[in-house]
Amino acid sequence: MSIITTVEAVPSRLYAIYSSLFDIENGEAKDRLESWATPPSLKNTTEDSGGSPTKLFVNSLLEARRIGLVEEIDDKLQLTADARGGGKKGDRSEAYFRRYLLRTLFDPIRAEETQQDSFMLALTWLLSTNPLKPMSFSDDPNSAIKMTLGENARKTDCTIPLNYQNMLYWARYLGFATVVGVGPSRRVIPDPVNAIDDALPAIFADGNELPVETFLARLAAIYPVFEKGSVWERFNAMRLIPLNGAETRLSATTSIALQRLADRQRLAMRSVADAPDRILDFGVREDRVSHIGLRGSN
């Protein structure tokens, strides 16, 4: 089980549990927590296939325990010390919630220990798709994933619509996707602009310009789903058709995200003669980049 396969465990529901316990150092009884955490977030059924509020709470709580957010001590539920992350009553709880999720979901060892490793593989597949051709939010993804991974598609846990949609909710929440439209016309676009933007302070911790390969290595150390990352390499090894130019080109998704950050004056990209570079793929045109610099704050 994982946040993908537990369809009730969308970000808003896990955060409802987390935030309800954040300001309570000594824990709370399960029935009281359910009464607090259920309205309004857990009674909102717009992001699932339906079901009673009690079932939604129980399944969300099971997943919260599985990923290490919550533990039970003396018949009371409370946040684990790791999930609390040093946060105190009155702090902005969502910042600590997101920080814990990022540490858990994007660390390959922690992700495997908490049964979440399928999420990064599914996310890598999403980032490998063409952002210039948005995909349906509702269609069965099995055929599309199998076209890329064959029988390894099952390792993404996204071969049925409910799991696929749950992955998309998490991808959007963590800054890797944009969902547009309503109803049957709803579309999803791989869009990691916000995720990359959030990582820039750590990437440029010791300087304002880096060779592109150093930039990519540091980005991949934070998010292994990008080029040079361990999950990206695992994904490419599973491909039915090998990816041509993997050592010289960036995906269209990464290329467009970097260009959008440059357009926002967050990054500067340049190509220096004789310096190792990468090809940027914009679909209708290409460019090259050898150095990436940090320009300023939002």
Image: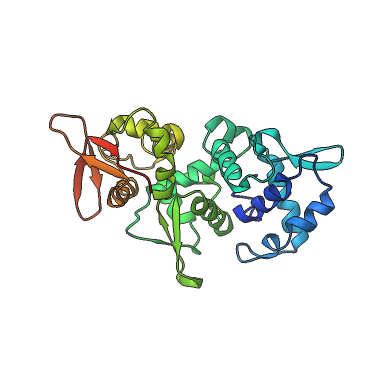
**Quarter of the rendering containing residue 103:** top right
Q: Is residue 222 left or right of residue 88?
A: left
The image quadrant that residue 218 belongs to is top left
Toward the right, the furthest residue is: 74
The residue positioned 83% from the left and 53% from the top of the image is 32
Q: How is the image coloured?
A: rainbow
Residue 282 appears in the rendering: yes
Question: Looking at this rendering, what residue extends furthest in the front direction?
Answer: 90
Tell me the quarter of the image containing the N terminus: top right
Residue 191, percent from left and from top: 40, 52
Q: Position of residue 89 (x, y in %)?
A: 69, 43
Locate residue 135 relative to residue 99 in the image: left or right: left
Q: Position of residue 246 (x, y in %)?
A: 30, 37
Of residue 243 and residue 77, the one placed in the foreground of this image is: 77
Using the image, determine if residue 94 lies above or below residue 108.
Answer: below
- Would residue 229 be seen by someone viewing this image from the given angle? no
Circle count = 0
Q: Nearer the viewer, residue 18 or 106?
A: 18
Give how far across and how far down residue 18 sits, in percent.
Answer: 68, 47
Which residue corresponds to the image point at 72% horizontal and 57% vertical from the top-left? Answer: 56
Residue 64 vs 209, above or below: the answer is below
